[in-house]
Image (cartoon, rainbow, N blue to C red):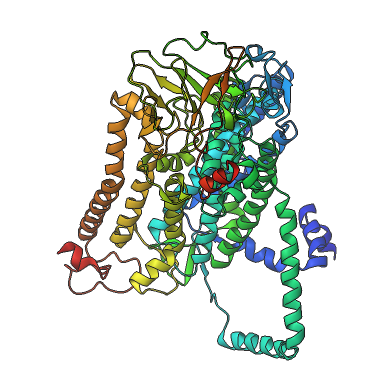
């Protein structure tokens, strides 16, 4: 008993909790949790830490933001807009920017954190894809991760639409039109979501509730499952250093990894603070308040929405009309193409298992070159989204390149088909070449097994190799 | 711990933490003295970044580097556990399944509750039937400019000019916003069949809401007579009933019939030729219902 009393306060507190919960058992295994060392495993952490920054700055902003379309006359510190009638939402955004101490920093850090958050998610997702980390037993976490990505994308869009400035108003207008283009249910969904036809006075309060309550709650719930499953599955690792499918090699959470991860939390936050401090973002005071009869040309959405905008622009002016009924044009670019693209992404773990016939558990990661055809498909998909994103600013591009929008549009339409095919083919050839240079000894699956006899035939040869190399 | 190479190793992380303390205090100073965005951002960067760097260095220099190896263990339960679970579930289900009648009633109650839950969802917004197809334009409604002034015959817009007009008293109605264009007198405007008397004094009016995604069709190239939507570059030919000639828009901008009242003020002679705004599946059907 005397021994116990000499323990530090923190431990005594933990023991008090353990007396009432029995938490120490799990606590030990948590302290021992192993984190393999690889820079690419930090991408998800960058996303997580950006999300923490988003929550913190977002709570601060919530105290000052007025989610209302009610009209007020602006009389704050920003002289050029004095006397203008603006919405309360826009008014309070200017108030945060100019009249709340550290308000501009919080606003800009929040916006930058959103961009970094989604970028980190995308790169994390690419890492998962190219290394085959979505394979059994992690299919569910792939699906949850994609859902997290879609939630984040939507919340980013709602977030920058809240301020009721000229740019965001145009974005919602387009989103609304895409929504009503869905056959049968579209107009109802749009009317229910936004409280009527565009521009409804209900839109800002609705989007505010979605942005600060509904989607964050969903993200938190999904994130909890995502990380819980990560703990249950234990981390994947790359081959080498004794890593096998039945073990996990790395640093323990306590103390080494906790200090490194904690350090990364501070470093990510530091860079977000720097971005918010010195790089202006979304200067709504320059864009001016939203007026539906106005629109500025060269309006650009945040980067992660660009591919949707590009998808709308690239689509030829097709629509289906039968009598008095129609499937309007925005449906193809705004609903169908994204729907198919994300449907394939969600289904990928099962599609690939079907192609390879490999339904076994995998914890050792693939090197991208060793799965040449998967890597080729991944690069192709990436190029597809990239061309669409570029097309999202085709008018700006046409001005920069001093050509017509027409020529730019047609070039991008051709590229949308050609770039993924060509990029995929080149990727495939490069991967195969790298495999040959490695020789047969590198095999991520068979760590301790001697190489196969025939050095000309790489062990990773997938069933479709013959037809493509022929 | 206070001498030797260990001590030397401590210097850099120690420096980082000292820098973090200084930057943190400086941040206080900046805030108290009125705040300045760039200074706040940079100091916060230095403070947070130094703590982060200090922690990482601490981990790299003084904490056990590993590698540690942990057995993954078996993910799925054993066959016995799975069988036991299935058996337990089956045993528990039997007395439920035996009450088939109650089960059906419960399902019915659940369905009724589900149907009742549609009611609050229905409250979220008005029916598209009413709200998606009505513009205040009608025979005799005066057109007013963005300031609310009526358009007097022979004044604005100037030759080749364009202004945005609204139905009187509806300056906030983006759905009813209309482009009023003065055509050149020697131009090659060709009215659509049946709309020969929809223009007056070389004035023609089209809905300003793009039929593609609803952006305001804000750019007018007077020499070519083209209207351009800045959102997705849909382009409409003013001289040919605003037919789409480029971009994703598939249908023309609806035309508004124009005339003059007894005070020589511009009025609409009726509603738009077609439903304004971006399309949806039963747009034309609803429009026809409302205009018969």
Q: Position of residue B74 (x, y in %)?
A: 53, 76
For residue B224, say whether it is visible: yes
For residue B3, say whether it is visible: no
Q: Nearer the viewer, residue A437 or B238?
A: B238
Q: Nearer the viewer, residue A253 or B101?
A: B101
Whether residue A305 is situated above or below residue A9 in the rendered picture: above
Instruction: Say which residue appears at 43% left-offset and 45% top-offset.
Output: A329
Quadrant of res B23: top right
Q: Position of residue A104 (x, y in %)?
A: 64, 25
Instruction: Say which residue appears at 51% left-offset and 32% top-offset.
Output: B209
Instruction: Pick the quarter of the image with the N terminus of chain B.
Output: top right
Q: Nearer the viewer, residue A319 or A306?
A: A319
Q: Residue furthest top?
A: B155
Instruction: Say which residue appears at 37% left-offset and 35% top-offset.
Output: B247
Instruction: Pick the quarter of the image with the C terminus of chain B.
Output: top right
Quadrant of res B55: top right
Instruction: Say which residue appears at 46% left-offset and 22% top-offset.
Output: B199
Instruction: Say how many tags the image has.
Output: 0
């Amino acid at each position: 008993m005397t021994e116990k009393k000499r323990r530090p306060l923190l431990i005594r507190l933990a023991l008090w909790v353990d007396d009432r919960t029995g938490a120490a058992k799990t606590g030990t295994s948590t302290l021992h949790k192993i984190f393999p060392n690889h820079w690419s495993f930090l991408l998800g952490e960058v996303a997580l830490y950006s999300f923490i920054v988003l929550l913190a700055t977002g709570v601060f902003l919530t105290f000052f933001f007025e989610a209302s379309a009610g009209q007020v006359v602006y009389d704050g510190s920003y002289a050029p807009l004095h006397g203008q009638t603006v919405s309360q939402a826009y008014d309070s955004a200017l108030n945060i920017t100019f009249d709340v101490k550290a308000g501009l920093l919080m606003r800009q850090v929040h916006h930058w954190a959103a961009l970094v958050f989604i970028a980190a998610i995308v790169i994390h997702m690419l890492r998962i894809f190219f290394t085959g980390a979505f394979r059994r037993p992690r299919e569910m976490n792939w699906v949850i991760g994609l859902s997290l990505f879609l939630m984040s994308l939507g919340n980013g869009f709602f977030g920058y639409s809240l301020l009721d400035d000229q740019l965001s108003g145009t974005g919602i207008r387009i989103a609304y039109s895409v929504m009503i283009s869905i056959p049968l249910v579209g107009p109802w969904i749009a009317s229910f979501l936004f409280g009527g036809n565009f521009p409804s006075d209900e839109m800002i309060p609705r989007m505010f509730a979605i942005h600060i309550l509904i989607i964050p709650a969903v993200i938190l719930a999904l994130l909890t499952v995502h990380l819980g499953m990560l703990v249950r599955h234990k981390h994947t690792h790359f081959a080498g250093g004794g890593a096998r499918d039945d073990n996990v090699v790395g640093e323990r959470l306590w103390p080494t990894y906790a200090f490194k991860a904690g350090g990364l939390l501070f470093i990510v936050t530091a860079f977000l603070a720097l971005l918010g401090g010195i790089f202006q973002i979304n200067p709504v005071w320059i864009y001016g308040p939203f007026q539906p009869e106005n629109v500025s040309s060269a309006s650009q959405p945040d980067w992660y929405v660009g591919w949707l905008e590009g998808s709308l622009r690239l689509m030829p002016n097709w629509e289906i009309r039968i009598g008095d009924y129609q499937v309007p044009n925005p449906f193809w670019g705004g609903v169908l193409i994204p729907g198919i693209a994300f449907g394939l992404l969600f289904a990928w773990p099962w599609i690939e298992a079907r192609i390879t016939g490999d339904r076994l558990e995998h914890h050792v990661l693939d090197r991208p070159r060793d799965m040449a055809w998967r890597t080729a498909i991944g690069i192709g998909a990436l190029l597809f989204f990239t061309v669409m994103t570029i097309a999202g600013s085709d008018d700006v591009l046409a001005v920069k390149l001093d050509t017509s929008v027409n020529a730019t549009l047609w070039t991008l339409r051709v590229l949308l088909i050609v770039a993924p095919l060509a990029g995929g083919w080149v990727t495939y050839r490069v991967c195969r070449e790298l495999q040959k240079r490695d020789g047969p000894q590198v095999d991520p699956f068979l760590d301790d097994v001697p190489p196969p006899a025939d050095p000309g035939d790489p062990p990773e040869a997938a069933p479709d190799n013959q037809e493509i190399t022929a | 711990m206070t001498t030797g190479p260990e001590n030397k190793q401590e210097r850099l992380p120690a420096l980082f933490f000292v820098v973090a303390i200084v930057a943190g205090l400086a941040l206080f100073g900046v805030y108290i003295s009125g705040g300045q965005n760039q200074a706040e951002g940079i100091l916060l960067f230095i403070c947070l970044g130094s703590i982060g760097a200090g922690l990482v260095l601490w981990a790299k220099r003084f904490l056990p580097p590993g590698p540690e190896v942990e057995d993954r263990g078996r993910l799925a339960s054993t066959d016995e556990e799975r069988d036991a679970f299935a058996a337990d579930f089956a045993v528990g289900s039997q007395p439920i399944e035996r009450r088939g009648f109650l089960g059906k009633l419960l399902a019915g109650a659940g369905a009724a509750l589900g149907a009742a839950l549609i009611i609050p969802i229905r409250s979220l917004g008005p029916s598209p039937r009413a709200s998606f197809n009505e513009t205040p334009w009608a025979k005799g409604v005066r057109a007013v400019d963005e300031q609310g002034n009526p358009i007097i015959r022979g004044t604005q817009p100037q030759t080749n000019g364009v202004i945005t007009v609204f139905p009187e008293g509806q300056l906030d109605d983006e759905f009813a916003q209309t482009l009023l264009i003065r055509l050149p007198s020697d131009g090659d405007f060709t009215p659509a069949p049946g709309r020969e008397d929809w223009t007056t004094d070389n004035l023609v009016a089209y809905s300003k809401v793009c039929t593609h995604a609803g952006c305001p069709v804000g750019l007018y190239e007077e020499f070519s007579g083209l209207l351009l939507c800045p959102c997705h570059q849909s382009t409409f030919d003013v001289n040919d009933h605003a037919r789409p000639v480029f971009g994703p828009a598939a249908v023309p901008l609806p035309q508004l019939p124009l005339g003059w009242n007894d005070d020589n003020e511009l009025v609409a002679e009726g509603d738009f030729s077609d439903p304004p705004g971006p399309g949806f599946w039963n747009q034309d059907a609803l429009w026809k219902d409302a205009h018969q």
